Image (tube, helix red, strand yellow):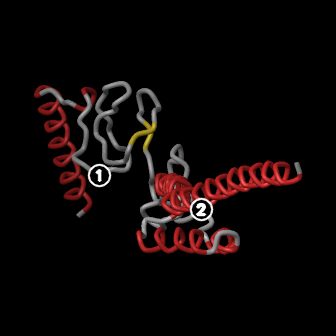
Amino acid sequence: MTGSTLDTFVTYATVCFAIFGALLAALWLSLVIWTFRDMRSRSRDPFAQILATLVVALLPGLGLVVYLILRPPETLAEAYERSLEEEALLQEIEERPACPGCSRTVNSDWLLCPHCHTRLRKACPDCNSLMDPHWNLCPYCGNKHVDPYHVGPPVVLAEDIVTEEEAQRDSVEDESEVIQDEEAQADTV
């Protein structure tokens, strides 16, 4: 019986070692595949992917430790997200309005730059909305905007229009004043 018990024990030990060996082989193969996939998510360089996989495959325990120490700290997706965040921050900085005179950051509702006094906006006289200084038409109320800082032809008002009768009467009065002045000068001489 000792021979059959020994044969049974050897059979069970062989089966246990076979199962344990199969589990170790599956673990080794899964670590090699995981290393390849992890390195592929961290680098686009095919040489680095193959080298990391070979290190883990050829040095089963130590290779994984070496790979974990030397692998890139972030995945390509994390690097892409970080670059998007940086780009969004830069775009936010670039979208801030800057003074055309001194290039300092200004608020969008300021009329003048507080640093260099450059005119940034003008107010519509009808609706008081802020407009770009180059606009001649208010986009908010639709009225034409007369720029108080712009020098142009003089505006003629209806009160300033003189009729022909008034002009003739004024010229006759001016002539009579001139004649009276000449007579007064002649009398004094």
Using residue 187 as the reference point, say whether residue 39 is left or right of it. right
Mark 2: which amino acid? Glu
The residue at 23%/64% (across/down) is 189
Q: Position of residue 113 (x, y in %)?
A: 53, 57
Residue at point 29%, 52% (across, down): 151
Q: Which residue is mark 2?
A: 74
- Tell me the SS state at disc 1: loop
Whole-angstrom CA distance, mark 2 to mark 1, is 62 Å
Is 65 placed left or right of 118 in the picture?
right
How crowded pointer 1 is (Cα within 10 Å; few <14, some 14-19, many 20+) is rated as few
Residue at 48% across, 60% down: 40
Quadrant of residue 185 within the rendered picture: bottom left
Read off the residue under disc 1: 151
- Could you tell me residue 150's position as x and y percent? 32, 50
Q: Which type of secondary structure does the marked residue at label 2 adopt?
A: loop
Q: How many marks?
A: 2
- In this view, 136 is above or below 150: above
Residue 74 seen in the current view: yes
Seen from the viewer's position, the closer of residues 122 and 148 is 122
Residue 96 in view: no
Q: Earlier in the sequence, mark 2 or mark 1?
A: 2
Which numbered circle lies on residue 141?
none
- Viewer-closest of 114 and 29: 29
Residue 133 appears at what percent x and percent y?
Answer: 36, 47
Q: Residue at x 62, y 60 (%)?
A: 28
